[in-house]
Image (cartoon, grey):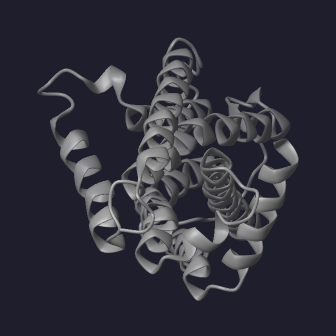
Amino acid sequence: MIRRIWTAYTVELIKARRLWFTYIGPVLVVLAVLGAPLLRPIERDGVSDYGFIAYATPVALNLLGLVLLLTYCAGLISSELSGGSIRMVLVRPLRRCEFLAAKLLLGMTYAVVLTVLVGMTSWLLAFTFGELAGVSYGGEVIYTAGQMRNAYLLGMLLSLVPQFAAVAYALMLSTFTRNTGAAIGAAIGLWIVLDTLKHPLRISPYLFSTYLEVPWKVFSNYGEMLDASWLPAVKYGLATSVASFVLFAFIAGCTLSRRNLHA
């Protein structure tokens, strides 16, 4: 089973590399970071520019990046349902659950690519045009450059968990309809509605999207010499995101297993 999933995932990667749409997300998030200095300037003024990194990362990743991730993943299955290509794929000795697992891995890979590109671009800009010499106060080093780098890397890893939940969420909606536009619209529209109403409805702690910015708030606090504790927010974020991922993937699997692929 693992070998079939890996083979299907490899095929999905090859297919994705041949589609121009795959490259829109990476290009746009890089452009978003490159445009961030217009709003948050970088200067060689003796002050480290970790604040720029803490600003550019969530802007490119949690706003634009999440929309791009939802758009990409919402079309992964619905497009094959509408075109009928899913029937050809499942003619091979590939179960529907294995097909779904390969799509999940593809979406998760896309999330990793977007996250890495945002991180590399923001750090490269800060290194080239600003300063990254650690965080100091009154001549005393509070956090070294290595500690700040490690904090950012940890933040990247932690930010991937709610992004993976977003992948499963979009794929779940992608199994509901053959219309790719409807799947994308539902994925983005429902997310916007819930994100707008989560505080009035007091459901904020139970939504994975609530925890997308937690790692970057902690990293920002490191740079501003404020309280930089990862817990308990990260613990709740991991639990909520993992639970959401499992739930969405389960619903997607049940839906796909019951779909009439010939209708």
Whole-percent x, y for residue 11 in the image: 77, 69
- The quarter of the picture where the N terminus appears is top right
In-front residue for pair 102/56: 102
- The quarter of the picture where the C terminus appears is bottom left
Count the marks: 0
| Identity of the residue drawn at 46% across and 66% down | 68
In-front residue for pair 68/136: 68
In-front residue for pair 261/16: 261
| Identity of the residue drawn at 76% across and 57% down | 93
Does 8 sit left or right of 60 as displayed?
Answer: right
In-front residue for pair 134/172: 172
Does 197 sit left or right of 94 as displayed?
Answer: left
Q: Residue furthest top?
A: 232
Whole-percent x, y for residue 209 in the image: 40, 38
| Identity of the residue drawn at 65% across and 47% down | 101
Whole-percent x, y for residue 35 in the image: 50, 75
Residue 67, picture quadrant: bottom left
Residue 175, picture quadrant: bottom left
Q: Is residue 178 above or below residue 199?
A: below
| Identity of the residue drawn at 59% across and 19% down | 230
Q: Is residue 222 above or below residue 93?
A: above
Whole-percent x, y for residue 139 in the image: 74, 31
